[in-house]
Amino acid sequence: MNIVDYDRALYYTHRSQWDNLLILMVRTEDQFLAKKIEHFLHSYHFEKDYSVLEKHLYALLRYIDHANTHLAEEAEYTMIQNG
């Protein structure tokens, strides 16, 4: 997992840069992130019900938060182990 991918996903989502978000979806090695981006972009372009769009947006943001937290904890654990 690459922390830069999560930072980019958050930035592109915040700035409504959907083309860059699509490119990130294709290039990332994290398949969960790619799927969350895919669901969000699909609902953004095709969904008429705003609550579905909101659900996919929050799912994407929750996953980005979860991944960043996990990577930070992993880095902290590695620093402790290497002392």
Image (tube, helix red, strand yellow):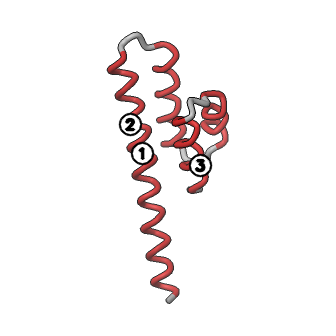
Measured from the top left, where is residue 17 in percent x and y? 61, 31
Depicted 43 relative to depicted 57: above or below: above
- The span from disc 1 to disc 2 (Cα, nearest Å) is 6 Å
Depicted 4 relative to depicted 38: above or below: below
> Would you say the residues marked 1 and 3 are in contact, meaning their CB atoms lie under 8 Å apart?
no
Residue that carries the numbered disc 3 in the rendered image: 5
Mark 3: which amino acid? Answer: Asp
| Earlier-in-chain disc, 1 versus 3 | 3
Residue that carries the numbered disc 2 in the rendered image: 59
Mark 1: which amino acid? Answer: Tyr
The circle drawn on residue 4 is: none
Residue at 38% across / 44% down in the picture? Answer: 62
- The span from disc 2 to disc 3 (Cα, nearest Å) is 16 Å
Local crowd at mark 1 within 10 Å, few (<14), some, or many (≥20)? some
Does 17 sit left or right of 54 as displayed? right
> Would you say the residues marked 1 and 2 are in contact, meaning their CB atoms lie under 8 Å apart?
yes
Mark 3: secondary structure:
helix
Mark 1: secondary structure:
helix
Measured from the top left, where is residue 70 in percent x and y? 42, 60
Measured from the top left, where is residue 2 in percent x and y? 59, 56
Residue at 37% across / 35% down in the picture? Answer: 58
Residue at the front extreme, as displayed: 15
Residue that carries the numbered disc 1 in the rendered image: 63
| Earlier-in-chain disc, 2 versus 3 | 3
Mark 2: which amino acid? Answer: Ala
Residue at 67% across / 34% down in the picture? Answer: 23
Mark 2: secondary structure:
helix
